[in-house]
């Protein structure tokens, strides 16, 4: 199965073609995944459902009977790229009339039947909560109809489905802990495409992490749009689900997962500045294997802009969270997301974003121009009034500053000896390996007999803004 992650659309992961072993079955499935890590994790659930339904998998779209694209709606250009890809597949369909093409995920949810009726690009439209229905939808299409399921659910978490692992390295895996989002940041389409927030039963999460460890994995990343609002046994209205079972919050869940095994590294994404608790920071500090790394999207450094973004915190509150992190977890890697050119953003407000970057000094940042999304609060209330060239100019300023900070941060690592989890051979040579430090910095080093899944001590000797170089000092 070919899974393609798109580099520019992904805030947590590098784009790469992901392969899995072929499984037996008569019909062949080709699946491409765009966007965030949550989509990638969902694709693993989709693969599991369809392999159980008798599909085999292929990395070659030309031999597929079924092509599925798991899509992203976060910015306009993400959707445009996916439309182009769908048009390519549609041309292939002219040569192979039996080919079924389906669209999954956020774009399916957002555009619903438009893609079937107006654009005539697909046979199946399946939103993020309808994947259990895919075998039925495929049957409908085989019976000569188009098939749609874009119902959002209040409780679907796919908790009982054991995902088919699509990671290339067999060392790092994603585990979903919540679905949906109730935050309503004014720029964001996610609450409309992924529905209400719900948390997954902690025992199924721990079981999945233990199964990954037993299969040789050495790192899990717990995924949610806002991991800090994880709360098992409460509905989103605050009602208790099961009287006999205690409530578990994110800090407690982190500890439960950390207890799976001391050699299983635990990461998580994404934290929300308004909800991140001191207990979470203490859990990170307490457990060696919970990585000293927090992705804490700031979006803007100006309190008025943050208010219009409906983020629920001010600049001061955010900086106070950063101070708490630095106090409780010395040497914690902090990364962020930034949106530039949001509605009415003045030059002074843009300067505030640059100044908060200087204050925090992020390891890395994912930086975007504001892209207006249909139905969102910002689309309805504000004008997208910063000209494209000005957005681009501000973005470049932000990127240049971040690159300086990333390089300085990497330079500060030179001379240190770091515990590195080996992930894969490096892109350049089989004789070199790539791994990550606890604070999520990428390191390249000579193999010296190490293999994926090993922990090695690496002395950092050199760097550029994207990665560190080092040598194994003690295996
Ligand atoms: N325009 C630009 N960037 C956006 N993001 C979310 N919505 C938009 C938008 N409409 C960014 C935010 C978020 C990240 C996943 O994508 O920075 O944290
Ligand atoms: Fe979107 Fe805000 Fe929810 Fe993140 S927290 S998914 S930015 S609405």
Image (spheres, helix red, strand yellow):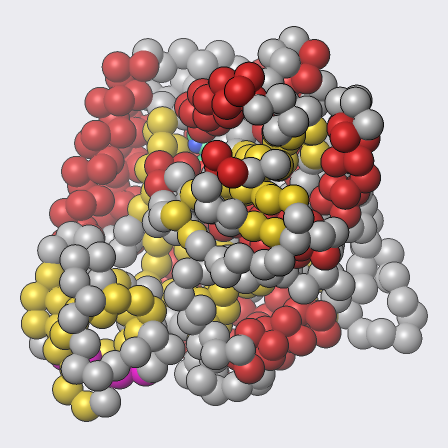
Residue 397 located left or right of residue 160: left
Question: Is the residue 89 above or below the residue 161 in the image?
Answer: above
Residue 257 located left or right of residue 88: right
Q: Name the dominant secondary structure of the magenta segment.
A: strand
Number of marks in the rendered image: 0
Let me know if residue 403 appears in the view. Answer: yes
Let me know if residue 307 appears in the view. Answer: no
- Check residue 77 for magenta coloring: no
Name of the residue lying farthest toward the bottom: 474
Question: Is the residue 41 above or below the residue 217 in the image?
Answer: above
Residue at 46% across, 25% down: 85
Residue 147 located left or right of residue 432: right
Q: Quadrant of residue 416?
A: bottom left
In this view, the residue in front, 36 or 171, is 171
Residue at 46% across, 22% down: 88
In this view, the residue in front, 198 or 66, is 66
Name of the residue lying farthest toward the right: 243
Q: Residue 408, position in %: x, y? A: 13, 57
Quadrant, the C terminus: bottom left
Q: Residue 289, position in %: x, y? A: 44, 80
Please state the extent of the stretch shown in magenta in the rendering: 455-459
Question: Is the residue 100 above or below the residue 290 in the image?
Answer: above
In this view, the residue in front, 384 or 414, is 414
Q: Residue 245, position in %: x, y? A: 85, 74
In this view, the residue in front, 347 or 342, is 342
């Amino acid at each position: 199965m070919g899974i393609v992650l798109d580099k520019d659309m992904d805030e947590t992961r590098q784009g790469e073609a992901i392969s899995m072993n072929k499984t037996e079955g008569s019909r062949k499935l080709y699946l491409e995944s765009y966007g965030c890590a949550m989509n990638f994790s969902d694709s693993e659930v989709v693969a599991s459902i369809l392999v159980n339904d008798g599909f085999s998998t292929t990395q070659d779209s030309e031999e597929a009977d079924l092509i599925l694209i798991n899509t992203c709606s976060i910015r306009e250009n993400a959707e445009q790229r996916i439309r182009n890809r769908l048009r390519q597949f549609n041309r292939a369909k002219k040569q192979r009339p039996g080919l079924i093409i389906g669209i999954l995920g956020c774009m399916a949810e957002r555009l619903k039947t438009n893609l079937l009726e107006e654009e005539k690009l697909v046979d199946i439209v399946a939103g993020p909560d309808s994947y259990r229905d895919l075998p039925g939808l495929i049957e409908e299409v085989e019976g000569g109809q188009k098939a749609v399921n874009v119902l959002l659910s209040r409780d679907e978490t796919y908790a009982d489905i054991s995902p088919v692992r699509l990671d290339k390295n067999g060392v790092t895996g994603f585990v979903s802990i919540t679905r949906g989002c109730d935050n309503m940041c004014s720029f964001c389409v996610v609450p409309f495409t992924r529905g209400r927030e719900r948390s997954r039963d902690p025992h199924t999460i721990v079981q999945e992490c233990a199964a990954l460890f037993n299969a040789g994995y050495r790192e899990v990343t717990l995924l949610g749009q806002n991991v800090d609002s994880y709360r098992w046994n409460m509905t989103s209205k605050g009602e208790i689900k099961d009287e006999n079972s205690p409530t578990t919050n994110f800090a407690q869940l982190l500890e439960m997962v950390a207890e799976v095994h001391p050699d299983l590294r635990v990461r998580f994404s994404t934290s929300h500045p308004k909800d991140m608790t001191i207990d979470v920071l203490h859990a990170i500090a307490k457990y060696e294997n919970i990585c000293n790394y927090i992705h804490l999207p700031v979006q803007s450094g100006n309190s008025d802009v943050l208010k219009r973004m409906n983020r629920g915190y001010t600049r001061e509150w955010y900086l106070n969270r950063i101070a708490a992190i630095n106090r409780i977890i010395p040497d914690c890697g902090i990364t962020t997301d930034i949106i530039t050119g949001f509605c009415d953003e003045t030059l002074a407000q843009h300067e505030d974003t640059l100044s908060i970057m200087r204050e925090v000094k992020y390891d890395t940042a994912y930086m975007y121009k504001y892209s207006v999304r249909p139905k969102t609060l910002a689309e309805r209330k504000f004008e997208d009034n910063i000209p494209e060239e000005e957005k681009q100019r501000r973005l470049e300023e932000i990127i240049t500053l971040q690159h300086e900070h990333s390089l300085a941060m990497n330079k500060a690592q030179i001379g240190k000896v770091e515990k590195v989890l080996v992930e894969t051979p490096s892109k350049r040579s089989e004789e070199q390996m790539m791994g990550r430090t606890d604070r999520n910095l990428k390191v390249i080093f000579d193999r010296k007999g190490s293999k994926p899944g090993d922990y090695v001590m690496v002395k950092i000797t050199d760097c550029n803004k994207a990665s560190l170089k080092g040598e194994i000092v003690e295996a």
